[in-house]
């Protein structure tokens, strides 16, 4: 086969759209691999890049996740809107060689929707795709790397065939240490102390609300809403947002930036021989910028407690960097296995399956950890990602307040210590009865939209904490005088985890709500919300056909959403005299027009 060479080695641009940090980590991994192959490389979030410059780029890799119901991540939304302008000429990207790698979860209906749509649009605009679209899947036996690894091997084979390196210049080996992205300059002569989460901020900054400047909201109450003997700890937490200028409506989401626990911070400091009180300024390498959320100067305590995700389950890049520092033969051999393509099953069994944390991995490799240098901290650990929660309150009923319904994550694996969710454990620990406590937060638009018309009914199916956005909607609609409110709520037991029971019953007594409950463990045969939906086929058909009814589902993505959707279609057949295909068409029409909406999570 004849290979056409592009003679001048290009500058590789890696652009990512990331919601939870996985796509960013993958993009940075591609950047490191490019440096080892002597390519000039830039790695940027899509919305930080001037998309108008795309016409002059020659080689770009796009790494993007899909969020919600097939939506682009927050840090690629501006890029997305620009790229899909109808005014863009068909051949405007004809000089561009590109590749698209999608990161998704096949348990969601719109699996890798953004990556698929992006590749199609790039081709419409004249770009040449170097290899087929990569569709990484969280459900793969080896996680996303099961697809990413072979896709990257094919990508580099293609790139190096088109742009062969200069003669005699071989790629750097995997155990050669690349320069750090940042160098720490410690301040010995600074006398003032920086304190974690209690820095003096000017009033304007206090009123702002964004990821770079979250609002420090005071925790007003932190109430357990499950019985003390119930295995699941669920909290209703109330935040004071007075003086924040934050506004929201039903269906919106609050983003909360959590902290690591002090025990893990102390352990990292001990293993790496760090003084948490030391202050530093970051000096970025060429092409890097200091993260906007990190104060300058900063303490190591703040960096480790509030910025770096030392409690995460580490990705492969973590082990690749450890391998570069390893001198102990046993540790080096094990790390080399974890970094190899052949060792991915072993790595998955060691790390991902038992949900082993980065701190625990460092403890398992003590010699290597002791040799780590502080300059590589930001290469080793990812940034703590904010967590999103459906807002469970309404400003019309709860002025200057935000409520969330939080399930505290704790579970067992083969490891001795129980696994704990970073954000939920931290939030549950904030006790306002012991003094003032605050949480950094900001609000963003959610995917659920409720009808503005007073005569439109809403049917809401929200088992467990899935009821949170519907609590917000009910308080908002009742304050607006809207009727036709139907709620299907499900949990295990009426005496153990019937969240907000008194509130629902008060709304019922006031004839503001039709409530249907499913307590799965209160009788021998398990009853779930889909069974109650099926039982109310007559009511649902009437509301949907005669009251412009809108149907909503929120909760766990596993089985419930599909089962509830099937129950709704059965109602169309039994009450509307439809065939299965006609019921499917009606369901799809409701979905297209926004009269059927769902918000689910894995």
Image (spheres, rainbow, N blue to C red):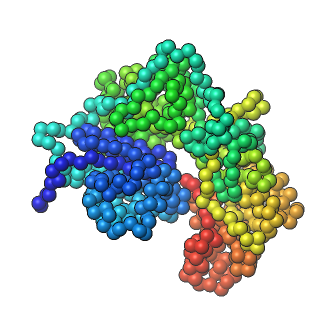
- As rendered, which of 116 and 508 lies closer to the eye? 116
Horizontally, residue 70 falls left or right of residue 215, namely left
- As rendered, which of 561 and 11 lies closer to the eye? 11
Relative to 518, say whether 258 is above or below: above
**Number of marks:** 0
Question: Residue 438 placed where, x, y %?
Answer: 68, 35
Question: Residue 593 placed where, x, y %?
Answer: 60, 73
Residue at image x 76%, y 39%? 221
User: Residue lying farthest bottom?
Assistant: 577
Question: Residue 473 placed where, x, y %?
Answer: 73, 59
- As rendered, which of 407 and 33 lies closer to the eye? 33
Residue at image x 65%, y 55%? 252
Residue at image x 64%, y 28%? 200
Relative to 38, say whether 153 is above or below: below
Residue 525 visible, this orientation: no
Picture quadrant where residue 440 is located = top right
Quadrant occupied by the N terminus: bottom left
Picture quadrant where residue 535 is located = bottom right
Residue at image x 75%, y 54%? 394
Question: Residue 340 placed where, x, y %?
Answer: 30, 40
Residue 359 visible, this orientation: yes
User: Residue lying farthest right?
Assistant: 509
């Amino acid at each position: 086969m004849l290979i056409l060479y592009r003679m001048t080695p290009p500058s590789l641009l890696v652009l990512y759209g990331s919601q939870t940090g996985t796509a960013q980590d993958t993009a940075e991994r591609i950047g490191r691999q490019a440096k080892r192959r002597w390519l000039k490389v830039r790695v940027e979030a899509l919305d930080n890049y001037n998309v108008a410059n795309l016409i002059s780029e020659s080689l770009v890799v796009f790494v993007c996740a899909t969020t919600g119901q097939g939506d682009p991540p927050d840090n690629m939304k501006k890029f997305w809107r620009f790229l899909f302008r109808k005014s863009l000429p068909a051949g405007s990207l004809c000089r561009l060689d590109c590749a698209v790698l999608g990161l998704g979860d096949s348990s969601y209906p719109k699996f890798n929707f953004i990556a698929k749509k992006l590749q199609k649009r790039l081709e419409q605009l004249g770009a040449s795709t170097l290899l087929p679209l990569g569709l990484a899947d969280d459900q793969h036996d080896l996680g996303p790397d099961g697809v990413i690894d072979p896709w990257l091997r094919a990508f580099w084979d293609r790139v190096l065939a088109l742009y062969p390196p200069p003669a005699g210049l071989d790629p750097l080996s995997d155990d050669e240490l690349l320069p750090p992205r940042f160098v720490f300059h410690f301040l010995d002569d600074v006398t003032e102390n920086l304190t974690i989460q209690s820095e003096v901020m000017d009033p304007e900054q206090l009123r702002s609300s964004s990821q770079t400047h979250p609002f420090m909201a005071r925790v007003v109450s932190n109430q357990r809403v499950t019985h003390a003997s119930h295995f699941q700890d669920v909290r209703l937490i109330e935040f004071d947002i007075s003086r924040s200028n934050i506004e929201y409506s039903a269906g919106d989401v609050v983003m909360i930036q959590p902290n690591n626990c002090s025990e893990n911070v102390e352990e990292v400091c001990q293993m790496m021989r760090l003084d948490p009180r030391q202050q530093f300024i970051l000096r970025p390498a060429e092409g890097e910028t200091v993260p906007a959320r990190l104060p300058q100067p900063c303490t190591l305590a703040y960096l480790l407690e509030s910025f770096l995700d030392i409690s995460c389950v580490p990705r492969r890049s973590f082990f690749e960097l450890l391998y570069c520092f390893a001198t102990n033969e046993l540790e080096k051999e094990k790390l080399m296995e974890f970094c190899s393509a052949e060792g991915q099953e072993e790595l998955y069994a060691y790390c991902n399956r038992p949900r082993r944390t980065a701190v625990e991995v460092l403890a398992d490799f003590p010699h290597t950890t002791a040799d780590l240098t502080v300059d590589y901290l930001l290469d080793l650990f990812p940034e703590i990602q904010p967590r999103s929660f459906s807002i469970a309150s309404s400003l019309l009923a709860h002025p200057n307040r935000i409520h969330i319904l939080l399930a505290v994550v704790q579970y067992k694996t083969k490891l001795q210590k129980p696994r704990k969710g970073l954000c939920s454990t931290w939030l549950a620990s904030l006790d306002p009865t012991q003094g003032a406590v605050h949480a950094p937060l900001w609000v963003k638009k959610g995917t659920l939209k409720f009808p503005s018309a007073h005569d439109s009914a809403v049917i809401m199916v929200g088992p467990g904490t899935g009821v949170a956005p519907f609590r917000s909607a009910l308080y908002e609609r009742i304050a607006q005088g809207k009727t036709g409110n139907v709620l299907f709520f499900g949990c295990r037991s009426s005496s153990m985890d019937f969240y907000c029971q008194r509130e629902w019953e008060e709304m019922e007594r006031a004839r503001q709500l039709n409530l249907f409950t499913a307590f799965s463990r209160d009788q021998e045969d398990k009853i779930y919300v889909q069974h109650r939906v099926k039982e109310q086929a007559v009511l649902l058909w009437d509301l949907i056909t005669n009251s412009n009814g809108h149907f909503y589902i929120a909760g766990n993505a596993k089985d419930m959403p599909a089962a509830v959707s099937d129950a709704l279609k059965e109602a169309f057949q039994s009450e509307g005299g439809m065939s299965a295909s006609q019921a499917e068409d009606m369901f799809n029409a409701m979905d297209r027009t926004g009269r059927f909406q769902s918000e689910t999570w894995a």
